[in-house]
Amino acid sequence: MGERSIRIRVPGTSANCGPGFDSLGLACTVYNELTLSLTHEPRLDIKVTGEGAADIPVDERNMVWRSVQYLLEQAQEEDHFQGCIMRMENHIPLSRGLGSSAAAIVAGLRAANVLIDNRFNRREIMQFATELEGHPDNVGPAIFGGFTVSIVNNGKVDTCSFLPKVKLKLVAAVPDFPLDTKLARQALPEVIPFKDAVFNVGHASMLVAALCRGNERYLRHSLTDAMHQNYRAKLIPGLQEVFRMARYAGALGAVISGAGPTIRAFVLERDQCASAVADAMVAGFAQNGVKANALVLDVDTKGAHIVNEWT
Ligand code: HSE
């Protein structure tokens, strides 16, 4: 590796959490790790192992490298550092709605920031990450961990993060096909009925209140959406069935994870039914001709963090 190296770990995330379209997000215990050192000469030595390794470009198009460059430009260091040596070990499934692109962006920004002596604070990193990703709901929990609420005013992002008061298991049923977020956004209408907007304002607000207060009953009631999930159902075969089967097996509720195709169930830890919910969700997909793999995860409490640093 080059002169000074940093190893950083970034969690996977679920955006939207049902009603909180483009605003709410939750970090979970599946991680990508990045080892980075910057070079003065213009060279790119990028190697990727694990999830999506065959599909991730290892040239100028690489998302982590683009984020590193973005950070260097903000610090006016792009002439000083023109290349990098980078190793990515990925465990977050690619293009499945589990925040793999947010993790790449956050890893690049955070790691490069450490290598230029933490010129920017986490709020500034959050702003850069939102500019690169286009919306704040995945990058928020990837940076801060836990559950995040983000809003954007005139391009400026504000993010609140907190740890849910309810002890949760998160079950992700991950189909074996990718879904491009752009395509999943094209499935949405330009306008929605006023009553659907009202429904989502109430449900998203209640979801946050229930997680803050530890109110399990209201949490169960708030995991529904009228804004995006139904429009995306045609892109995720078996969506309603997997929702139903997850609830039947004991989940509080289930939602599309981000733009999909992963479906995320919220389970109370003390109900001890996470593996039954996982089996039910995989079976629900199978009944609709979709092969899926289930991950039983916890809420990540740390967000992106440094694992190691050496010279
Ligand atoms: N909020 C975004 C969407 C998440 O649902 O399109 C995708 O990363």
Image (cartoon, rainbow, N blue to C red):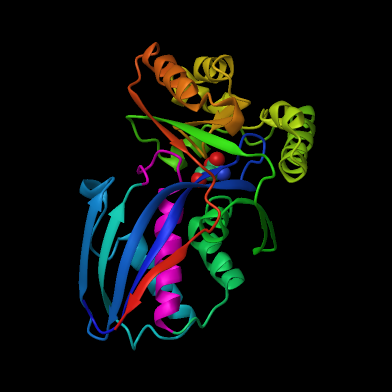
| Span of residues in magenta | 92-116
Whether residue 47 is visible, yes or no, is: yes
Q: Main secondary structure of the magenta part?
A: helix
Closer-to-camera residue (273/63): 273
Point out residue 203 in the picture as x, y percentages from the top left corner: 75, 34
Closer-to-camera residue (69/305): 305
Q: Residue at x 59, y 51 (%)?
A: 146
5 over 25 or under it: above or below: below
Locate residue 11 relative to residue 197 in the image: left or right.
Answer: left
Locate residue 224 relative to residue 297 in the image: left or right.
Answer: right
Q: Residue at x 75, y 27 (%)?
A: 217
Q: Residue at x 32, y 29 (%)?
A: 176
Q: Is residue 23 magenta?
A: no
Q: How many marks?
A: 0
Name the residue at the top extreme: 287
Closer-to-camera residue (273/292): 273
Name the quarter where the C terminus is drawn. Answer: bottom left
Point out residue 294 in the picture as x, y percentages from the top left corner: 40, 29
Whether residue 268 is visible, yes or no, is: no
Point out residue 289 in the picture as x, y percentages from the top left corner: 34, 14
Q: Quadrant of residue 80?
A: bottom left
Name the quarter where the N terminus is drawn. Answer: bottom left
Name the residue at the bottom extreme: 80
Locate residue 139 relative to residue 92 in the image: left or right.
Answer: right
